[in-house]
Image (tube, grey):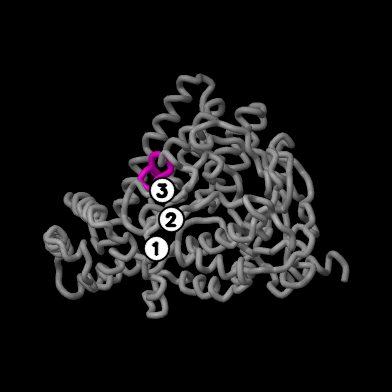
């Protein structure tokens, strides 16, 4: 079989527009082959949407591509350069263990990045081995697919391949390569790199590329770079509101982890909140709570301010005017975020229309949930099902008074209440990737080679608004009293 026949059989249809940007923004190099690649899991539905044959991807040649042992026809592998603020401190970064194979043009004409994560050292590895462990790669697969099912913009996982060789961390761990699919891997940090280390021509080329890729309608605007800033702010306000509405804690909102497409990217120390508490932190390295659940909107605004700084030379010839323009756009972030968060919270409570008391009604419920340590997801699930079973929250007089206010606000007859329940059903997931369930699935897969636990979890998470009986077991809370901690995926 010839190379072209293999390409046609798999369905790869690469373009490489990023490789046509200034060479200062990336380094071209092939992935580093692995010893004994073996397919662990393949996302067949995603493959089909990309125009790829699952059968061909499962073949030896297909797995070789997913492992980085073979570069498919049309791909031009490269590692992207970027910089960023990590926990508030600027540093040089870059794709230290990932390679962009190229951009797949789907049957629908969409352009998406195909990236191998854990594919070996690059010029940006900063002393790292460029590899990834199986557990964290499977974890990204689970969480990113759960986020997609929840309706939250996200990168997705096409496949995880075990490498047959260990990666050395605190102990030897089985290695793996994740194939990540993204609208793009353009980040705030990409612009920080171009602004700090490139020329004004590099920066302009990157900005025009970002507009062409994600905001093409803005290319004809008088100040297209101001529109770029405005559009990125709008998408981030929408994204962070969606995170907050489902209790998602990203855990490491460094500027290199903010995608300009508005997708959630990088699933290292992320997790979903159990008991409602704005101070919730899962990351083992976030000792000051910088990226706590309740801080996510303000951190997003901080990151966007860093993005706006990179655009100043493009916004206006007069720096003072450029700063004023940028500040006005950044100030609008909280207006946009609050509007979308409030609309989402109204939907979670079945409220239609807008009433002045809605915000205080919402804040009062959240305050009671925090006071009584109520589970975030299950509280809204119980309200949706009208099953406020015995608990500290639901048994309290304060909740009874709140419930009276809520019912009065809902108002209307049976038809109105039924419409409210339907709205709540669409807005409150019955299941989320509970932390203990994710760990259970990973332990079975990594320690025992048993993927069935993970597959059952993925099935339950695939339609989180179904409220089906087979999801009930995934709604139960962990019995462990130990605080849950997550770690950067390595």
- Of the two numbered discs 1 and 2 in the rendering, the one whose residue sits closer to the viewer: 1
- Indicate which disc, 3 or 2, sits on the residue closer to the N terminus: 3
Image coordinates of residue 51 in percent, x first then y, are 67, 67
Image coordinates of residue 303 in percent, x first then y, are 47, 37
Q: Which residues are magenta?
A: 290-300
Image coordinates of residue 245 in percent, x first then y, are 36, 56
* Label placed on residue 8: none
Mark 1, residue position = 480
- Of the two numbered discs 3 and 2 in the rendering, the one whose residue sits closer to the viewer: 2
86 or 48: nearer the eye?
Answer: 86
**Residue 137 located left or right of residue 421:** right
Q: Residue at x 39, y 39 (%)?
A: 298
165 or 179: nearer the eye?
Answer: 165
155 or 8: nearer the eye?
Answer: 155
Image coordinates of residue 482 in percent, x first then y, are 40, 57
**Residue 449 located left or right of residue 65:** left
Mark 2, residue position = 484
458 or 406: nearer the eye?
Answer: 458
Rendering quarter of residue 201 = top right
Is there any visible trace of residue 305 in the rendered image? yes
Name, please, the residue furthest toward the right: 2
């Amino acid at each position: 079989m010839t190379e072209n026949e293999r390409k046609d059989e798999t369905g790869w249809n690469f373009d490489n527009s990023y490789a046509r940007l200034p060479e200062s923004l990336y380094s071209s190099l092939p992935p580093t082959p692995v010893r004994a690649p073996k397919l662990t899991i393949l996302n067949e539905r995603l493959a089909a949407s990309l125009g790829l044959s699952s059968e061909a991807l499962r073949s030896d040649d297909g797995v070789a591509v997913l492992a980085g042992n073979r570069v498919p026809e049309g791909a031009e592998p490269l590692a992207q350069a970027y910089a960023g603020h990590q926990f508030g401190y600027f540093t040089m970064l870059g794709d230290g263990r990932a390679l962009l194979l190229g951009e797949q043009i789907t049957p629908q004409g969409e352009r998406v990045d195909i990236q191998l994560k854990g594919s070996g050292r690059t010029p940006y590895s900063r002393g790292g081995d460029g590899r990834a462990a199986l557990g964290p790669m499977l974890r990204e697969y689970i969480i990113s697919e759960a986020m997609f099912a929840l309706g939250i913009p996200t990168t997705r996982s096409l496949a995880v391949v075990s490498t047959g060789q260990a990666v050395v961390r605190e102990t030897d761990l089985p290695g793996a390569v994740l194939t990540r699919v993204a609208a793009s891997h353009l980040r705030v940090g990409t612009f920080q790199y171009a602004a700090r280390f490139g020329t004004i021509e590099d920066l302009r080329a990157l900005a025009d590329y970002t507009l062409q890729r994600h905001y093409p309608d803005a290319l004809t605007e008088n100040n297209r770079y101001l529109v770029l800033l405005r559009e990125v702010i709008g998408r981030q306000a929408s994204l962070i509101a969606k995170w907050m509405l489902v209790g998602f804690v990203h855990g490491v909102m460094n500027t290199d982890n903010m995608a300009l497409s508005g997708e959630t990217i990088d699933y290292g120390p992320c997790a979903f909140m159990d008991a409602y508490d704005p101070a919730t932190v899962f990351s083992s390295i976030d000792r000051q709570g910088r990226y706590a659940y309740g801080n996510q909107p303000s951190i997003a605004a901080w990151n966007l301010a860093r993005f706006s700084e990179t655009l100043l030379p493009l916004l206006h010839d007069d720096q003072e005017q450029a700063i004023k323009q940028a500040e006005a756009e950044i100030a609008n972030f909280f207006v946009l975020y609050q509007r979308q968060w409030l609309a989402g919270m109204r939907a979670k409570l079945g409220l239609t229309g807008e009433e002045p008391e809605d915000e205080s009604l919402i804040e009062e419920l959240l305050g009671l949930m925090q006071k009584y340590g109520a589970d975030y997801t299950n509280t809204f699930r119980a309200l949706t099902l009208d099953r406020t079973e015995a608990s500290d929250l639901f048994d309290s007089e304060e909740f009874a008074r709140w419930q009276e206010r809520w019912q009065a606000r809902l108002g209307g007859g049976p038809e109105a209440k039924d419409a409210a329940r339907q709205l709540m059903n669409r807005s409150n997931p019955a299941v989320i990737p509970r932390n203990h369930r994710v760990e259970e699935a990973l332990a079975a897969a990594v320690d025992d080679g048993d993927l069935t636990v993970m597959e059952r979890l993925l099935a339950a998470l695939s339609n989180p608004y179904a409220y089906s009986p087979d999801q009930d077991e995934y709604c139960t809370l962990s019995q462990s009293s130990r605080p849950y901690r997550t770690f950067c995926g390595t």
